[in-house]
Amino acid sequence: MIESLNWFALLTRSNFEQTVYTTIVKKKIEAFLPKIKQKSTRKDRNLMIEKPLFSGYVFVKSSFEPADQLKILKTTGVVRLLGNKSGPLAIPPYQIESLKILTSTSMDLITGANIRLKKGDPVMIISGPMAGAKGEFIHHKGKGRVFIKIDVLGQYAGVEVDENNVEKLPDFLS
């Protein structure tokens, strides 16, 4: 019996998306790393750079077999497959196909960083000393600053960060 393959979201270490993607493809496993072109944020440069659409995530196609998933999890830079207590959660193929279509166009994409955040939105800090921390958007502080509430061991801590360092998490990842 041939087991069907499903798409899964794979959480990676910060800035390891390309390394994980390349290594997984070398292992002959189908993977997808959606990228967008953005103007470099460095003030000394005026060029377009390619960056992952979702910081910290690579999509992989695998079966639910533990041996197949272990092969993926043993890749340098991989943190875990996204899921719940029952195990990894498959992503519907139409969502991956939609991402492939979106990222294959030359149109400007609006990502979570470009959309005004609403109170309660799940967010992730994507750069700076707090990179990788996930929390809840509380409010805009003005002058490009936002306030994020982070749950730590049942306690809450608030942090003020630059708005450009925060991305709204997609619904299927929050």
Image: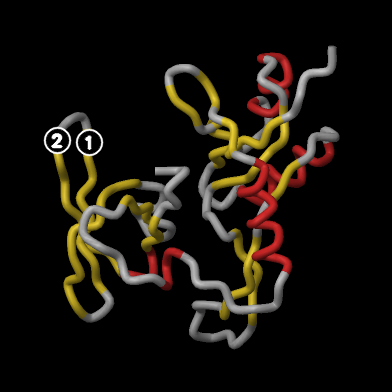
- Badges 1 and 2: C-beta atoms under 8 Å apart? yes
Instruction: Give residue 60's position: percent from left, percent from top.
Output: 69, 38
Instruction: Give residue 157's position: percent from left, percent from top.
Output: 16, 46
Inspect the image, locate mark 1, and give the three-letter code of the amino acid beneath it. Answer: Val
In the rendered image, which quarter is residue 73 located in? top right
In the rendered image, which quarter is residue 69 located in? top right
Q: Secondary structure at mark 2?
A: strand
Around disc 2, counting alpha carbons within 10 Å, would you say few (fewer than 14), some (14 to 19), or many (20 or more)? Answer: few
Residue, disc 1: 152
Query: Is 114 located above or below residue 60 in the figure?
Result: below
Residue, disc 2: 155
Query: Is 83 located above or below residue 173 in the figure?
Result: above
Horizontal side of 98 relative to 29 (left or right) equals left
Query: Is 85 located above or below residue 169 in the figure?
Result: above
Inspect the image, locate mark 2, and give the three-letter code of the amino acid beneath it. Answer: Gln
Question: Tag count in the figure?
Answer: 2
Task: Give the quarter of the figure containing the N terminus.
Answer: top right
Q: Secondary structure at mark 1?
A: strand
Horizontal side of 42 relative to 93 (left or right) equals left
Give the label on residue 91, or none: none
Query: Is 69 located above or below residue 110 in the figure?
Result: above
Around disc 1, counting alpha carbons within 10 Å, would you say few (fewer than 14), some (14 to 19), or many (20 or more)? Answer: few
Residue at image position (68%, 52%) is 33
3D distance between C-alphas at marks 1 and 2: 5 Å
Nearer to us in this view, 23 or 114: 114
Residue at image position (25%, 63%) is 118
Residue at image position (24%, 72%) is 145
Nearer to us in this view, 9 or 97: 97
Task: Give the quarter of the figure containing the C terminus.
Answer: top left
Instruction: Give residue 24's position: percent from left, percent from top.
Output: 75, 38
Residue at image position (43%, 19%) is 85
Horizontal side of 170 relative to 19 (left or right) equals left
